Image (cartoon, grey):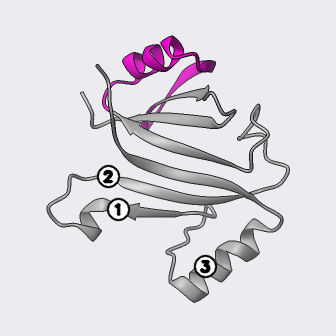
Amino acid sequence: MAKVIGLGGIFFKSDDPQRLAQWYKTYLQVPVENWGGAAFYLNNLMPMAATGYSVWTPMGRDTDYLHPSSKEFMFNLIVDDLNEALSQVAEGGAELLAETEDSEFGRFGWFIDPDGNKVELWQPSTQT
Protein backbone atom coordinates (compact mmCIF):
# COMPACT_ATOMS: atom_id res chain seq x y z
CA MET A 1 0.00 0.00 0.00
CA ALA A 2 1.33 3.47 -0.92
CA LYS A 3 1.81 6.00 1.84
CA VAL A 4 2.52 9.67 2.43
CA ILE A 5 6.14 10.21 3.46
CA GLY A 6 6.20 13.99 3.86
CA LEU A 7 4.67 17.38 3.20
CA GLY A 8 5.77 18.63 -0.18
CA GLY A 9 4.41 22.14 0.19
CA ILE A 10 1.52 24.52 0.36
CA PHE A 11 0.26 26.81 -2.37
CA PHE A 12 -2.19 29.61 -1.64
CA LYS A 13 -3.81 32.64 -3.23
CA SER A 14 -2.80 36.20 -2.45
CA ASP A 15 -3.96 39.57 -3.77
CA ASP A 16 -0.29 40.56 -4.19
CA PRO A 17 2.00 37.49 -4.02
CA GLN A 18 5.22 39.46 -4.59
CA ARG A 19 4.44 41.88 -1.75
CA LEU A 20 3.46 39.03 0.57
CA ALA A 21 6.58 37.03 -0.27
CA GLN A 22 8.74 40.09 0.42
CA TRP A 23 6.96 40.61 3.76
CA TYR A 24 7.70 37.01 4.82
CA LYS A 25 11.28 37.38 3.61
CA THR A 26 11.73 40.58 5.59
CA TYR A 27 9.98 39.62 8.81
CA LEU A 28 10.51 35.86 9.03
CA GLN A 29 13.61 35.33 6.90
CA VAL A 30 11.69 33.05 4.49
CA PRO A 31 14.27 32.30 1.77
CA VAL A 32 12.17 33.54 -1.17
CA GLU A 33 13.68 32.57 -4.50
CA ASN A 34 13.33 34.19 -7.95
CA TRP A 35 10.31 32.04 -8.81
CA GLY A 36 8.36 33.70 -5.98
CA GLY A 37 8.31 30.95 -3.37
CA ALA A 38 10.69 29.28 -0.99
CA ALA A 39 12.11 25.77 -0.74
CA PHE A 40 12.99 24.35 2.67
CA TYR A 41 15.59 21.62 2.22
CA LEU A 42 15.17 18.97 4.88
CA ASN A 43 18.84 18.02 5.03
CA ASN A 44 19.67 21.66 5.98
CA LEU A 45 17.18 21.58 8.85
CA MET A 46 17.78 18.08 10.11
CA PRO A 47 21.20 16.69 9.15
CA MET A 48 20.05 13.11 9.66
CA ALA A 49 17.01 13.52 7.38
CA ALA A 50 16.92 12.24 3.85
CA THR A 51 17.43 14.76 1.08
CA GLY A 52 14.21 16.52 0.18
CA TYR A 53 12.38 19.78 0.52
CA SER A 54 9.05 21.46 1.14
CA VAL A 55 7.89 24.57 -0.70
CA TRP A 56 5.86 27.61 0.29
CA THR A 57 4.28 29.42 -2.65
CA PRO A 58 1.99 32.46 -2.70
CA MET A 59 0.16 32.77 -6.02
CA GLY A 60 -1.95 35.45 -7.68
CA ARG A 61 -5.73 35.40 -7.23
CA ASP A 62 -6.09 34.75 -10.95
CA THR A 63 -4.06 31.52 -10.90
CA ASP A 64 -5.62 28.48 -12.53
CA TYR A 65 -3.23 26.15 -10.71
CA LEU A 66 -5.70 25.47 -7.89
CA HIS A 67 -8.65 24.76 -10.20
CA PRO A 68 -11.10 23.12 -10.24
CA SER A 69 -11.21 23.59 -6.46
CA SER A 70 -12.72 26.86 -5.24
CA LYS A 71 -10.51 26.79 -2.14
CA GLU A 72 -7.80 29.37 -1.53
CA PHE A 73 -5.06 26.76 -1.12
CA MET A 74 -3.71 23.42 -2.27
CA PHE A 75 -1.31 21.18 -0.44
CA ASN A 76 1.24 18.74 -1.79
CA LEU A 77 1.95 15.40 -0.18
CA ILE A 78 5.08 13.37 -0.92
CA VAL A 79 4.27 9.73 -1.65
CA ASP A 80 6.35 6.63 -2.15
CA ASP A 81 4.27 5.28 -5.08
CA LEU A 82 2.23 7.78 -7.12
CA ASN A 83 0.24 5.29 -9.17
CA GLU A 84 -0.76 3.26 -6.14
CA ALA A 85 -1.61 6.37 -4.11
CA LEU A 86 -3.86 7.69 -6.90
CA SER A 87 -5.56 4.31 -7.14
CA GLN A 88 -6.14 4.30 -3.38
CA VAL A 89 -7.68 7.79 -3.23
CA ALA A 90 -9.91 6.99 -6.21
CA GLU A 91 -11.08 3.87 -4.37
CA GLY A 92 -11.93 6.16 -1.45
CA GLY A 93 -14.14 8.35 -3.63
CA ALA A 94 -11.70 11.10 -4.63
CA GLU A 95 -12.04 12.67 -8.06
CA LEU A 96 -8.80 12.19 -10.02
CA LEU A 97 -7.71 15.16 -12.14
CA ALA A 98 -5.96 15.10 -15.50
CA GLU A 99 -3.06 12.83 -16.28
CA THR A 100 0.04 12.41 -14.19
CA GLU A 101 2.96 14.66 -15.08
CA ASP A 102 6.64 13.74 -15.24
CA SER A 103 9.18 16.49 -14.63
CA GLU A 104 12.76 16.98 -13.53
CA PHE A 105 11.45 17.00 -9.93
CA GLY A 106 9.62 13.68 -10.20
CA ARG A 107 6.07 12.58 -10.93
CA PHE A 108 2.91 14.48 -10.01
CA GLY A 109 -0.79 13.65 -9.83
CA TRP A 110 -3.84 15.52 -8.53
CA PHE A 111 -7.21 14.79 -6.99
CA ILE A 112 -10.13 16.50 -5.26
CA ASP A 113 -10.72 15.13 -1.75
CA PRO A 114 -14.19 14.60 -0.20
CA ASP A 115 -14.16 18.18 1.20
CA GLY A 116 -13.41 19.72 -2.22
CA ASN A 117 -9.71 20.39 -1.58
CA LYS A 118 -7.32 20.02 -4.49
CA VAL A 119 -4.39 17.84 -3.43
CA GLU A 120 -1.18 17.34 -5.35
CA LEU A 121 0.74 14.09 -4.89
CA TRP A 122 4.46 14.07 -5.61
CA GLN A 123 6.75 11.10 -6.04
CA PRO A 124 10.25 12.66 -6.09
CA SER A 125 12.57 11.51 -8.85
CA THR A 126 14.90 9.98 -6.24
CA GLN A 127 12.18 7.50 -5.22
CA THR A 128 12.23 4.07 -6.81
Whether 90 is among the magenta residues is yes
Q: Secondary structure at mark 1?
A: strand
Callout 2 amino acid: Gly
Q: Residues within 10 Å of mark 1 (few under 14, many from 20)?
A: some
Q: Is residue 90 visible?
A: yes
In the rendered image, which quarter contains the C terminus?
top left
User: Which badge, 3 or 1, comes first in the chain's sequence?
Assistant: 3
Element marked by disc 3: helix
> At numbered mark 2, what does the secondary structure look like: helix, strand or loop?
loop
x and y percentages locating residue 7 in the rendered image: 42, 49
Residue corresponding to mark 1? 41
Question: What type is the residue that disc 1 sits on?
Answer: Tyr
In the image, residue 20 sits, relative to residue 116, either above or below, namely below
Residue at the far bottom in the pictured view: 27
Say whether disc 3 or disc 2 marks the residue closer to the N-terminus: 3
Q: Residue at x 58, y 88 (%)?
A: 27
Circle 2 residue: 52
Decide: is 76 above or below 100.
Answer: below
Which residue matches tag 3?
Answer: 24
Q: Are marks 3 and 2 in contact (CB under 8 Å)?
A: no
Q: Is residue 105 visible?
A: no
